[in-house]
Amino acid sequence: MKILVLGGGGREHAIVNALARSPQQPELLCAPGNPGIAASARCLPDLDPVDTAAVTDFARDEGVDLVVVGPEAPLVAGVVDALNEAGIAAFGPGREAARLEGSKAFAKQAMEEAGVPTAGYSVVRDRDGALDAIASSSFPVVLKADGLAAGKGVLICL
């Protein structure tokens, strides 16, 4: 079995290490990978995990049996959808489901519509709207950037 892991961070390193312990001894590839991952998998630094066409073409040309997607950006870009359309097995949510991670505003609206308890929120589009929302809130106020921010898009204002 040939498995391609997309990503190059700690999560993907852990995934590659777990797969490397499999009794089936799959051939492991990782794009882009990192020096630590290179101990267990062939790293592909020139394959961009967000380039859905390049990932799909590579997987097809290399006879990859399974693609495991770690980071959010390729999921939001629709790499799982593209792989599935090409008949290549992929582990991860499709583009529409990945919107829950990719857009804080979409996630809050979806939770509200589904009756999931969540903190109050407002969606603001500019500085003046943000200042108005903050002025009408009690502290602490949590500000979140919409979109992917690699876990860095939050400010807690006391």
Image (spheres, grey):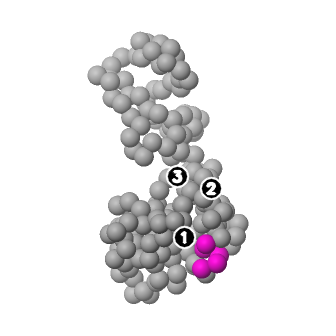
Q: Which residues are magenta?
A: 58-62
Let me know if residue 16 appears in the view: yes
Task: Kindly identify which residue carries mark 1.
Answer: 67
Task: Kindly identify which residue carries mark 2.
Answer: 78
- Badge 1 or badge 2: first in the primary sequence: 1
Residue at left offset 54%, top offset 61%: 48
Please tell me which residue lies in front, 118 or 71: 71
Q: Is residue 36 above or below residue 26?
A: above
Q: SS of the residue at dot 1?
A: strand
Mark identifier at residue 145: none
Residue at left offset 47%, top offset 75%: 29
Magenta region's main secondary structure?
A: helix
Q: CA distance from mark 2 to mark 3?
A: 9 Å
Task: Kindly identify which residue carries mark 3.
Answer: 73
Question: Looking at the image, do the residues carrying marks 3 and 1 touch, with CB atoms under 8 Å apart?
Answer: no
Report if residue 59 lies within the magenta region. Answer: yes
